Amino acid sequence: MTGHSQGEEEGLLTQADFAKTHDVTRAMVTNWKKQGQLVIRNGMVDVEASDAALQDAKLGRFNKSSWPDSDQRQQSEEALPSYADLPTVNQSERLKAAALADIRQMDAAERRGTLVNRALAHDFAAEIAIGIKQQLEGFPARHADIIAEKLKSDPRLTAATLTEHVRLELAEIADSIADRLAAGIAGAEPSTPDHFGGDGRGAAAT
């Protein structure tokens, strides 16, 4: 007979095995040991003496506050779904058939071009918006000299004026898009970033 078996016969358990008797972790048993709640003999836990100490302290399996009372058990049982609430086999088959029919209709509509993938449409619109924004931001640098020559004005002043007005226009467009998203008109999430203002007016004002 092994020493471990002899220890069990003598009412001794390792801390790991003793933790199982109280349905707690080994770390909890170690904590009890540090608090002096366990009786240790020959490096092992004296089960009877330690249980008595834990019972006095209302710890471990003696902590009745952790046990569900009758009301809690009843609430848990009521929360479980009733078999009467579950769909029958025929109802499940009908639901499955209806869902598959919806999927087939959406696939057909997408092939006809009457249904567009929202994510793809958003990405496409974003690419267009970014391209327009870049074209507008580059307009002053490309055309300031030509406009200044025709108006007989200072090219640098013309470029600065054009840049200022382009940024103001982009900021107004960004505000308009933000308002539409907030109102749900654009059909996108309110958190979707606009691509004209970037971070809002901060980007336009730089």
Image (tube, rainbow, N blue to C red):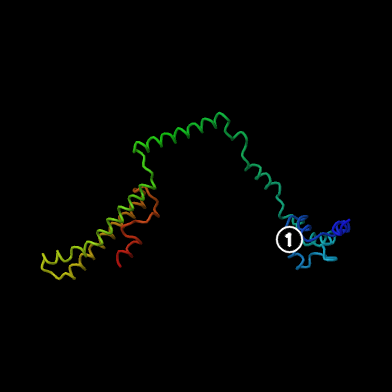
Quarter occupied by residue 146: bottom left
Quarter occupied by residue 66: bottom right
Question: Where residue 86 appears, x then y in whole percent?
Answer: 59, 35
Identify the image quadrant of the N terminus: bottom right
Question: Where residue 162 appears, x then y in whole percent?
Answer: 20, 64
* Three-letter code for the amino acid on which mark 1 is drawn: Arg
- Of 184 and 103, nearer the camera is 103
Determine the residue located farthest toward the front in the rendered image: 1
Vertically, is 72 above or below 7?
above
Question: Where residue 159 appears, x then y in whole percent?
Answer: 20, 67
Question: Where residue 195 appears, x then y in whole percent?
Answer: 33, 57
Q: Residue at x 17, y 67 (%)?
A: 158
Residue at the spot of label 1: 26
- Of 20 and 108, nearer the camera is 108
The reply, left or right, for residue 3 in relation to residue 135 is right
Q: Residue at x 30, y 64 (%)?
A: 204
- Of 184 and 31, nearer the camera is 31
- Of 148 and 45, nearer the camera is 148
The reply, left or right, for residue 119 in relation to residue 53 is left
- Element under disc 1: helix
